[in-house]
Image: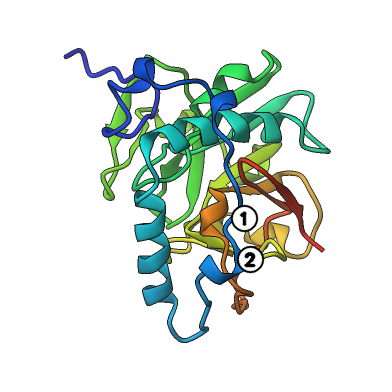
Amino acid sequence: PDGRHAFPLEPRVQGRFARIATAETFLLRPARPADRVSALPDDRAALRRRLRERRRALPAAARIAGAEALAGRLLALPGLPAEGYVAGYWAMDGEIGLHAWQLHLPPSLVYCLPVLGADQRLRFAPWRPGDALATNRYGIPEPDAAATGLLDANALALVVMPLVGFDPDCHRLGMGGGWYDRSFAFRRPQATPPLLVGAGFDEQETEPLALADWDVVPDAICTPTRTLHSP
């Protein structure tokens, strides 16, 4: 009623949280090779559709257990910054949630959410549950912050990125808008910071993806059961 939002749980998960057992109750297994979706360079749109359908089909119990397990993976990352700004995302369309990770961040790390810029690049703003949000052009909540209070991408120490799919070499398939690739293009010729990490369910793994010249490869991919590091 007052325009303030709680944690970014999907609508089909909200209201069920209290009735679902903790993450330790469930064992999430990576997709078997036969279940993986083949990645064809000229058919990324169809690949995205199939992977998004698979992601949305996961039951609520697996989503909540997966988010809890993912939080532990992210907190155990080698190179996790001791302090500074870290960015997550507002989970939509079946994406794995980051609410458990945000809750367990040490006080020295400031959680941020992305804000779409007019220049087709992302900026970032600190956000805590209860802070004001506005809906962007894609229907995704983002901090309702003044432009003067936004952070550039190079001000971050760690960025956790959503993904539609990933392959064993940490190549990331996004939604196709190029927002993260444009915003973090400066990372292609140089090392961290920020540390770039893709987050998804094991079921989103696919066969090797063909890279485009503009693709930014994450330093790692975290799922509920594995942490993959870029070669």
- Which residue is drawn at the image coordinates 34% and 48% (left, top)? 93
173 versus 156 height, above or below: below
Residue 226 located left or right of residue 60: right
Q: Nearer the viewer, residue 96 or 23?
A: 23
* Colour approach in the figure: rainbow
Q: Is residue 182 visible?
A: no
Disc 2 marks which residue? Answer: 167
Q: Position of residue 60 (x, y in %)?
A: 37, 35
Precedes in sequence: disc 1 or disc 2: 2
Q: Position of residue 36 (x, y in %)?
A: 54, 68
164 versus 74 height, above or below: below
The quarter of the picture where the C terminus appears is: bottom right
- Which residue is drawn at the image coordinates 51% and 83% (left, top)? 40
Question: What is the distance, in whole Å, between disc 1 and disc 2 at their CAs?
Answer: 20 Å
Instruction: Specify few, some or many for label 2: CA neighbours under 10 Å numbering under 14, 14-19, or 20 or more.
Output: some
Disc 1 marks which residue? Answer: 184
Q: Position of residue 125 (x, y in %)?
A: 49, 30
Give the foreground label among 1 and 2: 2
Label 1's element?
loop
- Which residue is drawn at the image coordinates 61% and 68% (left, top)? 33
Q: Position of residue 121 (x, y in %)?
A: 48, 54
The quarter of the picture where the N terminus appears is: top left
211 versus 79 height, above or below: below
Q: Nearer the viewer, residue 68 or 2?
A: 68
Q: Amino acid at mark 1?
A: Phe
Q: Nearer the viewer, residue 111 or 96?
A: 96
Count of numbered badges drawn on the protein: 2
Outermost residue to the left? 1
Q: Kindly indicate whether the residue at mark 2 contacts the one at mark 1 (C-beta within 8 angstroms).
A: no
Q: Quadrant of residue 110?
A: top right
Q: Amino acid at mark 2?
A: Asp
- Which residue is drawn at the image coordinates 59% and 25% (left, top)? 24
